[in-house]
Amino acid sequence: MRFDAAAAVLTVLDQTRLPFEVAYLHAHSAADCVRLIRDMHVRGAPLIGLVAAAGMAIAARCDSSDRALAVAAAHLLDSRPTAVNLRWALQRMQQGLAGVAIGDRAETAAALLLQLERMEYDCCERIAGHGYELLRQRAQQRGGDAPLQVLTHCNAGWLATGAWGTALAPLYRAALEGLPLHVWVDETRPRNQGARLTAWELAQAGIDHTIIVDNCAGHLMQRGLVDLCIVGSDRTTRSGDVCNKIGTYQTALAAADNGIPFYVALPSSTIDWELDAGADIEIEARDPGEVLQQDGQCANGDAASVRMANPGSRALNYAFDVTPARLVTALISEHGVYQANSVSLGLLRAALQSAAKDRFVGVEPL
Ligand code: MRU
């Protein structure tokens, strides 16, 4: 994404058009940013947070009164319910603007947005390093020259973060380091973020990959064809329960049954310190039409939307599920690798609180 502070315009890649077309969209208001998030032109927890923050920066340029900013923040917060990065980014913006004179708020908001972007970039880079170390160790443990077989779900790459990505960041680093690698890409029904977005990203980076239907993951694991799984997260509780794209839970179950490490890569902005149990996370229910109907491209290049199901039948479309902490081998954060439990995450929180003092001068660590 790119934010033009002088014109107060946000430009983003339209992810609904990928992989068939690279097209950009412009947001001129907070309401435009709400639409970008709600209609999934932008998606992925960290990017949703950044676009919401950009919405606040645009709002501050139009009317930076307390009331106007509160209204903008409420609308942005409502755009999608599950990814906690949205609330995190909005709180950062609101806290950072609270003590600032109204006339200076537009400039401050643009500076805060830039800080958040840099922070996400930094997180991705650090996650890449910590995650790569785990991949390298797994390859060593397994031995031989065959490529490391990694399975991922949904899209947690640069499209979802604006930087290297979270789950894909260690894979990009591994490719740069010359570690032989092959990625099993879960298609990720119903919106196909794996088949459309992750596959597109990996192809751009020249990383060998194969798209599989979501139901195939367990079978591959039973056959010894997966060395480790790595996924992102939309909200992780302080006890280590991980909410991520629907289907993550059953992938983790299959990994546990087959003794395969199941890693979750996430920036700390994805941890909800207010929640203990994953069962308390609000799970977004999207339009059932996404299950019944699929968008794609015809052989002649025309866009098409086709029916997938029995006409007249109902569908249910939960967008996320919760993987209990006991199924998660470890959480890969920007501060290192942590166990998915409240004691270990307490240590992460302490590390964050001291780092935040340096990063966000004048803003209380959350
Ligand atoms: O519905 P989406 O496409 O926004 O869901 C995205 C995911 O589930 C990702 O795995 C998650 O946001 C992590 S992105 C670094």
Image: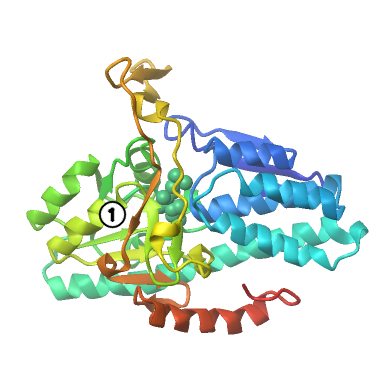
Q: Position of residue 199 (x, y in %)?
A: 34, 43
Q: Quadrant of the C terminus?
A: bottom right
Q: Please name the residue shown 21% across and 71% down the image.
A: 138
Q: Please name the residue shown 43% across and 78% down the image.
A: 345
Residue closest to the eye, 247 or 216: 247
* Within-10-Å neighbours for mark 1: few <14, some 14–19, many 20+: many
Asked if one can make out residue 1 in the rendered structure from this viewpoint, the answer is no
Q: Is residue 110 above or below residue 365?
A: above
Q: Is residue 46 left or right of residue 227?
A: right
Name the residue carrying label 1: 249
Q: Position of residue 52 (x, y in %)?
A: 64, 50
Q: Please name the residue shown 53% across and 56% down the image.
A: 46
What is the secondary structure assignment of the residue under circle 1?
Answer: helix
Q: Is mark 1 within 8 Å of ligand 1?
A: no
Q: Please name the residue shown 26% across and 72% down the image.
A: 136
Q: Is residue 94 left or right of residue 168?
A: right
Residue closest to the eye, 22 or 124: 124
Q: Position of residue 22 (x, y in %)?
A: 51, 34
| Quadrant assignment, res 191 | top left
| Quadrant assignment, res 35 | top right
Most extreme residue toward the left is 223
Model colouring? rainbow
